[in-house]
Amino acid sequence: MSRSAPLGAPTEAHHVLAITPFRRLWVSLSLSSLGDWLSLLALVSLAAIFTAEGSDLVRYLTVAGVVAIKLAPAVLLSPLAGLVSDRLDRRWTMVGGDVLRGLLYVSIPVVGLSFPGFALPWLLIAGLLAEIVALFWTPARDATIPVLVPKRMLGQADRLTLLATYGAAPVAALLFAALASVDNLLGALVPSMAAPAADVALYINALTFFIAAIVVAGLPLPKHTVASSSLSPHRDATLMRALGTGRRAVGSGPLTRAVVVGLTVTATMGGLIIGVGRPHVENLGAGNAGFGVLVAALFLGLGLGMVAAPRVLKQFSRRRFLGLSVVLAALALLLAGAIADMVLSAVLVFVLGLGAGLTWATGTWLINVEMEEERREDAFAFLHAAGRIALLTAAVVAPVVAGLVGNHELPLGGPLSYSLYGSGLVLMVAGLLALASAFVAARQAVQDDPEVGPGLLPELFAALRGVSPGVEEEDKTTVSGAFIVLEGGEGAGKSTQVRDLTVWLRDQGFEVLSTRQPGATKLGMRLRGILLDRENSHITDRAEVLLYAADKADHVEQEILPALRRGAVVISDRYVDSLLAYQGAGRDLDVAEIQEISDWATQGLVPDLTVILDVRPEEGLSRLGGPADRIESESTEFHNRVRKGFRALAEEAPERYLILDASESREKIARQIQRRVRPLLPDPVDADSEAVTGMIPVIKPE
C-alpha cells in the first residue's frame, strides 16, 4: 500500500565502540575503575592488618576511617572540584590524575616497608589525596565523552561507561581474592612485605593507572576552551540541590514514597557490607580472600538483578515486585549476620545483591513510567543522591557501631556457645529494620494501584506459572508483549515513526520486532509484489481483500504471535485497519464482512494501540518519491475515502487509538507516541542512560 523502510536496519547507536577515540577512552576508564576498586579492597584490608593487635574498637574505627576517606570526598566535594576541573585542560587533567593516583597508591607499600611506624597514617593520607585527585579526573572524563561521540550516540556511550565503572567491581574483587589465596606464596617470594596480597594489589592498581594515563595521552582531543556549553555536566550537581529540587519532583505519593524507601534501604544494605565486610570475614576466619569473595558476590548479584528484573515474574505486579525484592535483600542481610559460615555468608550476600539489583531496576522503571516527563530528571537525581548518602552513612557508621558493641561469646549450656560478633549483630539488626521498611514500601506501592491483583499469594503463584491471575494455565493464547500499530494514508510518515519508536525502545532495553504489512514473510514479499505492481490492475476488489488477508494470516502466525509470546514489543507498519480503510471504505466494500475475514486470518489478535497519522491526501502523496505503485496511483477521491475510513474506525474505539496530525514535526509526533506507548510496555526496563544502571547507588562518580 505504501513504501516502508528496510526491516531490521541497524542503527548507529549500536556501534559506538567503533569510534576509535571513544574506544580508547573506554579502555582507559575501565582500567582506572579497576584500579579504584582494587584500592578500596587493598586499603581496607591493610587497615585491618595494621590494627590486628589492637582492640576490636580500634580495628573497626580504622576500617571506618578508610571507608570514609574513600567514599566521602566524592559525595561531598565533587561539585566544587568540578568547577575547577572545567577550567583545566581535559587531556592532561586525566593523564595527570591517573599518574598521581598511581604514584600515591604505589607509595603506600613503599612507605610501609621503609617506615613501619608511619604506615597507617600514610595509608590514610595517601588514600585521601588519591580521592581528591579523582575529583578532578571524573568531570574531565565526563566532559570528554560528548567531544568524542555524536549526540545521537551519547546514550549508548553512557551505558558503556557505567558498564566499565561497575563491571570492574567484581573483576577487582575476584582478582583480590585470587591474590589473597596465594598470600603465603607471595610472602615467600618477597619476605619484606607485611601484607603481600594487599601490597601486590596496590602495585597492580598503580600499573592500571599508569597504562590508563598512556592511553589517554594519545587521544585526539581538541584544544580545550572554557565556555558555558563545555562545562562538565556535574558542575551544578550539588548534593543539596539534588535533594531539594529532586524531593519536590518526587512528591509525596504512595508509590514514590515506596520507591524512595526501597532504593535507599537497599543502598544502605550495600554500604553495610562494604563497611563491616572485612572485619566480619576476619571473625569468620577468612581474611582478605573472604573479603574479596564477599564484595564480588555483592556486585555480581547486583548486576544480575539489574539485568534480570525485566524477565522475572513478568505477570506479577511491578509494584508488588518492588516490595518483594526489598524483602529478599533484607532477609539475606539478616541471615548473613546470624550465620557464622563464610560460604553461606557469600551466598547470602549474593542474594542480597540480587535483591538490590531487582529493586533498583524496578524502582527506577516505575518512576520512569508513572511520573511526568518533565519531573523525571530531578526525581532520578534525588534518588541517586539519597542512595549515595545512604551508602556512605551505612559504610562509615556500621563499623563504628560494630566496634562499640564488640565481640562476645554467649553460653548456650554445657560446652556449647554462640559467637556474637559486633559485625554480625549490626547486620542482623539492620536486616530486621530493612525487613520492616520493606513491608512498609510494599504496602505503599500498591496503595493507589487500581490494577493490582486479587492478592499477593494468588498473584505470585499465577506469575510463577507464567499466567495472569485468574487465567488458566492451559490458555495458550496469552501473550506477554505489547503490540503497537502505525496506520495512515500514503506519505503520512509511518515508516519513519516505526523506525524512531524502535530505536527508542531498544535503547531502553526492550526486545523489539519492527515489521510491515504486506511483505514481512517470504509469502508476504511475493504477495506484496503482486498487490503493488501497477501491471496487475486486473485484480478484483474481493481477490485483493483475500490476498491481503492471506498476508496477515501468515504474518501473525509466523512473526507477530511468537514475538508477543516471548514478551517482545511488536511495532507494525499497517495491520487490519488498513484493510478495512483501503479495501472497505476505499473500494466501497462491506466493512463488516472484511472485519470477519480479518478476525479469522489474524486469530482475533487486536493491537494494544493503533496510532493513526492523519494527513490530507494531497499533502501525503506530494511527499512520495519515485514512481507510484498500484495503490498510490488511485484517485484523490479514493484516498479521501480511505482517510475517512481510518477516522471512523478510531471513533468506534477511541480508547485504543491515537490520532496525530502528520503535518507536525517528526520530533513532536515521536514524543506524543512515546508518551502514549509508555504505559503499555510489558517489561520493567530503565531508560536514558539507560537510566537503570545509571541509578545504581555509587561508590564514587566515575
Image (tube, grey):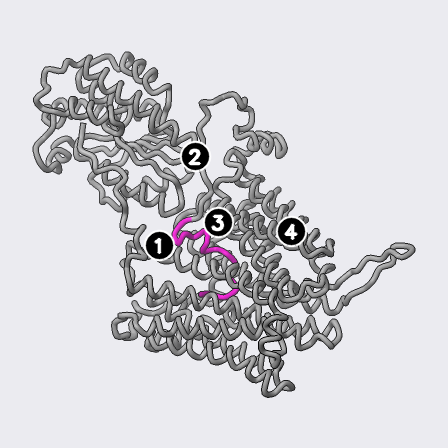
Q: Is 214 situated left or right of 394 in this image?
A: left
Q: Nearer the viewer, mark 2 or mark 1?
A: 2
What is the C-alpha distance between the residues marked 3 and 1? 17 Å
Question: Please, what is the dominant secondary structure of the magenta stretch?
Answer: loop
Which label's residue is closer to the chain start, 4 or 1? 1
> What amino acid is at disc 3?
Thr
Q: Is 86 situated left or right of 275 in this image?
A: left
Q: Which residue is mark 1?
A: 155
Which label's residue is closer to the chain start, 2 or 3? 3
What is the C-alpha distance between the residues marked 2 and 3? 20 Å
| Residue 567, disc | 2
Q: Which residue is mark 4?
A: 348
Q: Which residue is mark 3?
A: 364
The reply to whether callout 4 and callout 1 are in contact (CB within 8 Å) is no
Callout 4: SS: helix
> What amino acid is at disc 2?
Gly
Q: Which residues are magenta?
A: 687-702
User: Please, is residue 376 above or below residue 46 in the view?
Assistant: above
Q: Is residue 471 magenta?
A: no
Residue drawn at x 46%, y 54% is 693
Question: Few, some or many C-alpha atoms within 10 Å of disc 3 (few <14, some 14-19, many ≥20)?
Answer: many
What is the C-alpha distance between the residues marked 4 and 1? 34 Å
Of residue 310 and residue 436, the one placed in the foreground of this image is 310
Which label's residue is closer to the chain start, 3 or 4? 4
Which label's residue is closer to the chain start, 3 or 1? 1
> What amino acid is at disc 4?
Leu
| Quarter assignment of residue 197 | bottom right
